Amino acid sequence: MVYQFECSEGRCEFLIRSGSADEVKRLARAHARMVHRGRIETADLERDVERIELA
């Protein structure tokens, strides 16, 4: 299973995919902190991390 997070902040094009949901969440939090100088609430992160199937 593959997990992904796509940043929805403005025109940001950050996208992360990984086989580990924990890694996606960790990197999404780091991205928000470093690039946008903010943080992602846990509920928002849980909603925004998607499980996808790659063809």
Image (tube, rainbow, N blue to C red):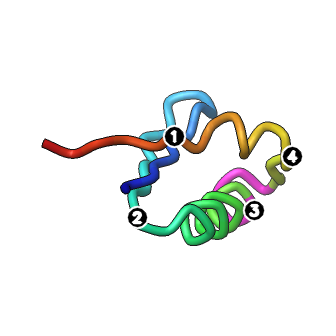
Looking at the image, residue 19 lies above or below residue 32: below
C-alpha gap between disc 2 and disc 3: 20 Å
Q: What stretch of residues is rendered in magenta?
A: 33-37
Relative side of 55 to 31, left or right: left
Q: Main secondary structure of the magenta part?
A: helix
Which of the image's four quarters has the N terminus? bottom left
Task: Provide the secondary structure element on which disc 4 rests.
Answer: loop
Task: Provide the secondary structure element on which disc 2 rests.
Answer: strand
Count of marks placed on residues: 4
Residue depicted at x 37% and y 41%:
52
The answer to whether the residues at label 3 and label 4 have Cβ atoms under 8 Å apart is no
Location of mark 4 (residue):
41
C-alpha gap between disc 4 and disc 1: 16 Å
The answer to whether the residues at label 2 and label 4 have Cβ atoms under 8 Å apart is no
The residue mark sitting in front, 2 or 4, is: 2
Location of mark 3 (residue):
33
Q: Position of residue 18 (x, y in %)?
A: 40, 64
Q: Of label 2 and label 3, which has the lower sequence position?
A: 2
Relative side of 42 to 13, left or right: right
The amino acid sitting under disc 3 is Arg
Viewer-nearest residue: 13 or 44: 44
Q: Of label 3 and label 1, which has the lower sequence position?
A: 3
Q: Of label 4 and label 1, which has the lower sequence position?
A: 4
Q: Which mark is residue 18?
A: 2
Q: Position of residue 5 (x, y in %)?
A: 51, 46
Whether 3 is among the magenta residues is: no
Looking at the image, residue 31 lies above or below residue 9: below
Q: Position of residue 6 (x, y in %)?
A: 49, 41
The residue mark sitting in front, 3 or 1, is: 1
Location of mark 1 (residue):
50
